[in-house]
Amino acid sequence: MFSITLKLMKKSARMLIPAGIAILIGTAFIAATFLFGNAMNDALAAQNTAQLGGANYVISPDSGKDLTDKDQDYIYTRTVNDFQLDRIRATEGVKDARASYAGSVTVTRGNKHASSYVITTAAKRTLLPVTITQGDQPADSNEIALTKSVADQLGVKVGDRVTVNSQAAQYAGKTGDSAGNTGDAGDESAQNADGTSSHDGDSDAASGASVSSDGANTADSGMTVRVVGLTDDPNGAYAYYGGASVLSDNVITAMAGSNDFGNLPVYLVYLDIDDASDTAAASTVKQVSTLLPKHFSVQSRAALVEESVKSMSSGETSITTIFLLSFGILAMLVAALVIANTFQVLVAQRRRTLALLRTIGANKSQLYVSVLFEAGVLGLIASALGVGLGIGLMAALCQSGLMKATGMTMRLVLSGPVFTVPMAFGIIMTVIASLGSARSATAVTPLEALRPIELTDTRRAGVVRAVISVLLIVAGVALCAVSVWQMSENIAGRDSMADKQYPLVLLAAIIGCALIFLGLVLSATFWLPVLMRGVGAMVALAGPSAKVAHANIQKNPRRVAATGAALLIGVTLVSTIATGAASAKQTMNEALTTRYSVDMIAAGTDMTGKQASEAAKVKGVQRGIYAPTRMMTMKDADGKSLSVLVVGVDGVDALRKVVRSDLSGVTIDGDSVLMPKYSAATGKDIPLDKSVTFTAGAAEAQADAANGPSGNDANGSAENGNGQSGGTQTLTLKPRKVDYRRIASNYAAVAFVDASHFTNGGIKADGHIMLMRIDAEGAGVALNDVFTNVQNVFSASAGVTVTGPVAERTQWETMINGMMALLVGLIAVAVLIALVGVANTLSLSVIERTRESATLRAIGMTRGQLRRSLAVEALLLSLVSGVVGVVLGTLFGWLGSYMVFSLYGDTVFPFEWATNGVVLGVAALAALLASVAPARRAVKTPPVEALAEA
């Protein structure tokens, strides 16, 4: 019987191709998902250990032990001197040792500035975590190997000189402190998750010394160093920072605000140990261990890699794999519907053959096993091809280098699940999907070999299915209604479960949507044929071809429902995601508009008026004002201290040009200050007395003194009458409150004062701000282009940042568009498979209606009319299912948007015409293409031959 089955498969190969394609796509997706997870794990493991460079051993804090807070403090306050590097390097078998210390510096050449992450050097370049692509690593004093990107940005090549500086060096120079607080700095470095001593410039400010080891003053001008090499970061060791530059020991010491390399805080030391002999390597490790501080040990690179992979086994990569795998399983479930229809086609086509097999002695169980065996063989072949396709696609992705943009270099990593899971899933799903057809095959009687039989399925759907479907829909609607009610109560400020158990309320909404959708899919045999009958009745008025299509589509409601449900799944998911993404963008845009009063701001200590003038000329920048700023503190009426950015402007009229707030009836003069009504930090009302006093702290005043006269001398104090004394600046003014929001979100409030306070010496500016109003649409440019061009204007100033709702909106839209493209692309696989099912349904219809088609031809229907009838039938199947999917998806998208984005503002409920239109257009086009092959089969057979055959 098995040999007969294989021969039947060979004969019906063309009919099996659509089902094989469905299986192939689904299994390829699953295989590619596992390969992607493997590649991610491998890339992240390599990235996590990339900072070891060529080190095969590392000295690190002990793990897996019960350490007290005192022990932790001890570990993260160790310095280079504590590790006795000279003795370690002198130990037999140790080729080199490198203490891991890192930070951030500003690199300057001429009027160009760039920020760079910097690390310590090593005697041998193999121990460095970055690659020296040109020149050499720093070996002597005052040397640097720059990242290629920074070198290109500054126009620097090997042999040139640049100036490096850091906040720590500047602070140390101003305070005259000598290598203080290294313990605190070490503690901050310990908080970094990437295993490095990330002692960046922001945290280094507390560590301070004023003079480098070679005596160079780094207070303001920085250190001039020679570029001896260029670096690259091929393994993504410092992908977050765009790579890392390498500094000689004396330079990195000065940049840390210290005067002794041995005082730098470290807790990782990388070793290059001769491991040609395991015994010798073990002996070397033992000797090195005796030189270490307590709670430190030597660990091999292999052990670190193993720990890294283990830590990720239940982390982000497994979540990503599960997420993608869910779409692969969805594709296979849709494919199961296609496979079921395919085997119905085969059984219908072979009804005479099966009947003849019964007449020569084949029993029902043999026919049953034959169909299942055929399904298993088809599943095996298609799944194997799918796995091969998945491997090929992943290999192409790895070779393309597309993932390098994420900072990771991915490679193809094969594993057992890549082969076993998709093939097992493909075979099992194919066999399960063929069970119904196998049962139909056993119902064929020997008499059917002698007479024609109408195989149209007229069975009614079961009552149990109807009851279960109704219960699922009712339960789903109830869960969704309760979730919406709880959210509305929360938004109204009333007691609600969403306030304390928001994840539970959100989960209830998701489960409710899933139950509604499952109930609709299960009950599709009831409502979908009725809906198609109603639409078909209107379409039938178009002519005889449409009337025939309308009659034919009603003959097998169960198959129509199965095909429609397959397409419904994919279209609903696409529409849900498109609606949710559109709602997210519009809701967040409106929320950002209401929460910010200025479209875009640029602020920094080294901003220049020339840059502001250039920014004002950027296309899309409608208006802009450039103003001096000073960070000061004040106390509200409750005595709470607030950090305030004081901005000097030329009256309220200048402010109206850029601030989106009601400033009518407001003035700004020498005695008043314009204050926001609400705190940017808490969102609560700021209580104010009749006058407020702004103070610039003593530490800031010391910095001013270090920079020279600022107009704040005794004479200035007396003249201004603002209470400046002892180096502290104060300013007392009458507040006027207006509801403007988040001018600069880094401060609790932004206060606007008359610019004369800055020009007459009352306040010394420590920075500048540019407030801009943006009209990208009116200028005919993209919002992202405006943001990028303004950023480029200020790129030469390392201390200037560009923020505001335009920036956040740009980043938000980029993220949403990326996620939407990914999800729609994934679900498109299911839609593609469902459209294959439309072709199968039409093929079955043609086979069943062989005699009917011949009769129509015999009484005068032309070939063109017969083709059109099949095309109309395909359009009815795809468009009715597609429209229902769009409606469902839009409703689900609206519900999801309300549950998530109502927390941020008034939710927008859009209808995504463009995406939904494209989906329906693709479905219609694919349906027309799917009707070509069945139509050709229907018109190819002469009427007389078809009647005789039937």
Image (cartoon, helix red, strand yellow):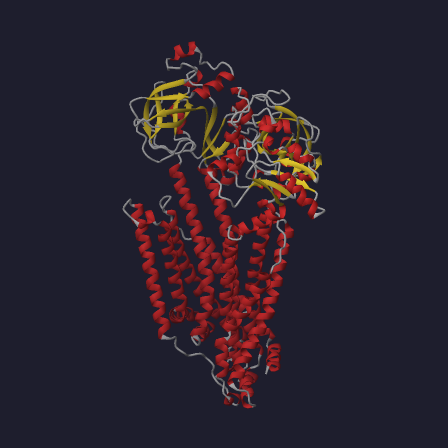
Query: Along the line of sight, which residue is nearer the eye, 572 or 290?
Result: 290
- Residue 251 is drawn in which quadrant? top right
**x, y (%) of residue 680?**
38, 34
Out of 568 and 437, give the one closest to the viewer.
437
Q: Quadrant of residue 354?
A: bottom right
Position of 510 compared to 378: left or right?
left
Is residue 107 at all visible to an observer of this figure? no
Quadrant where the N terminus is found in the figure? bottom right
Q: Nearer the viewer, residue 352 or 635?
A: 635
Q: Is residue 526 left or right of residue 621?
A: left
Instruction: Indicate left or right for 785 with 530 as reference.
Output: right
Q: Is residue 761 at least partly visible in the picture?
A: yes
* Residue 151, horizontal then vertical, whole percent: 65, 33
Residue occupying the point 45% across, 63% down:
569
Q: Residue furthest left?
A: 494
Q: Is residue 152 above or below residue 278?
A: above
* Residue appearing at x 37%, y 38% in the figure: 594
Q: x%, y% of residue 340? A: 50, 72
Q: Give percent across and percent down for residue 764.
A: 45, 19
Report the label total. Answer: 0
Q: Is residue 255 above or below residue 6?
A: above
